[in-house]
Amino acid sequence: MSEKTEPLLPRSVDSINDNSALVNDIAEVLITEEEIQARVAELGAQISVDYAGLNPLLVGVLRGVFIFMADLVRSITIPISVDFISITRYGPSTRTQGVVRFTKDLETSIQGRHVLFVEDVIDTGLSLRYMLRSLETREPANLRVCALFNKPRARLFDLDIAYTGFVLPDKFIVGYGLDYDERYRNLPFVGVLKEEAITEQRLPVRTQT
Amino acid sequence: MDDGSNSTRKPGTERTRPIRHKPADRRRPPSPRPEPIPNPKRPNGDPIRFSHPAEEAFAKVLDFYQIAWEYEPTTFPLEWDKEGRVIAAFSPDFYLVPEDTYIELTTMKQSLVTKKNRKLRLLHELYPDVKCKLMYRKDVESLAVKYRLFEHREREKDE
């Protein structure tokens, strides 16, 4: 029989600050781990009420959503199903590949299902719009969106978000699943990345007036 | 903000200011419902000449996400003189067709966008049904970071 170990204590930002190289890149903590957990619990409780008796399918968008999804489903008290999708994101490695496409599709049919689309963060709305349009063609009974973080200032057009955890300013945030260059996802809080940690993306000098 | 009103002036500056029309003279549209002016379409195959590299990069992002767009398809008259001639107008950079939304990218510094803010305000006043989003330099830079829009330029420069 293995020895009993002390349960892991919730980690505070201060305790992480001592040793984590990742934390050194954070300019400020926007939302603490405790605040996130409290809000996720509220969202889970609300979803449990709204979807009671509907056996909803929660669809998460990889990869940023995996931490939020794990906490959210554990705070939901009604029967649910879970599935994930993934799409290509625009960037240096994909901009020459034409258009966005699914890299992982659903493994569950959503026809006639009550689908709750779960996102970590919504800013421009470009990728969300693409995915919603695609899922709508599969004729779900209902398709709504739950986003832990919403940055409405960055939105290019109107989108209906049924559940929002936090409304954030349009700053580059990392942690709790959100990355920059695949780093910082494992921070338990959400922070603003220091400018020097971001590869410079300065606007080119105007070449024509 | 420059709204054409008679704001309090500093002593000694009265005669150095240019004479301006009263707002009522400058803004009144010739008809109760002013009409936007469609800009001529480019012939097929004629490449778009973007006025800033950020616009070209933004267009590529829209293409990637399969959003149909048009570049400066419409001009909105904003101010008229006493004879009804248009003296100020606004042509947003992009029109997102499926979303029926105009996007104006601003690459100027925040301190220089007062004029553009005013145009957007007038646009909303005169064309309340038109959806137009103004993206400030900071917003465009956020897009650049998110989608790493100019990374290839930096690489090319290094090489």
Image (cartoon, rainbow, N blue to C red):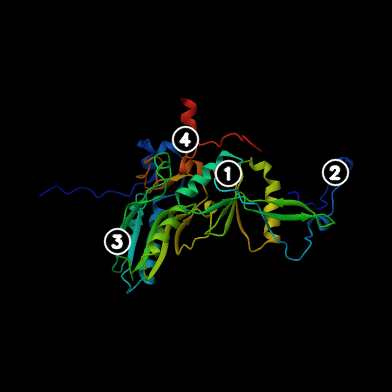
**Residue found farthest to the top:** B159
CA neighbours of label 4 inside 10 A, class few (<14), some (14 to 19), many (20+): some
As rendered, which of A154 and B158 lies closer to the eye? B158
Q: Earlier in the sequence, mark 2 or mark 4?
A: 2
Residue designated by label 1: B48
Residue designated by label 3: A82
Q: Residue at x 66, y 51 (%)?
A: B91
Residue kind at label 4, given as amino acid type? Glu
Q: Is residue B158 left or right of residue B138?
A: left
The nearer-to-camera label among 3 and 1 is 1
Q: Earlier in the sequence, mark 1 or mark 4?
A: 1
**How far apart are labels 2 and 4 at the CA level?**
45 Å
Q: What is the chain letter for disc 1?
A: B
Horizontal and vertical percent for residue A17? 39, 39
Same chain, marks 4 and 3? no
Query: CB under 8 Å between callouts 2 and 3?
Result: no
Q: What is the chain letter for disc 3?
A: A
Q: Is residue B24 left or right of residue B65?
A: right
As rendered, which of A185 and A37 lies closer to the eye? A185
Residue kind at label 1, given as amino acid type? Ile
Residue A173 position by quadrant:
top left
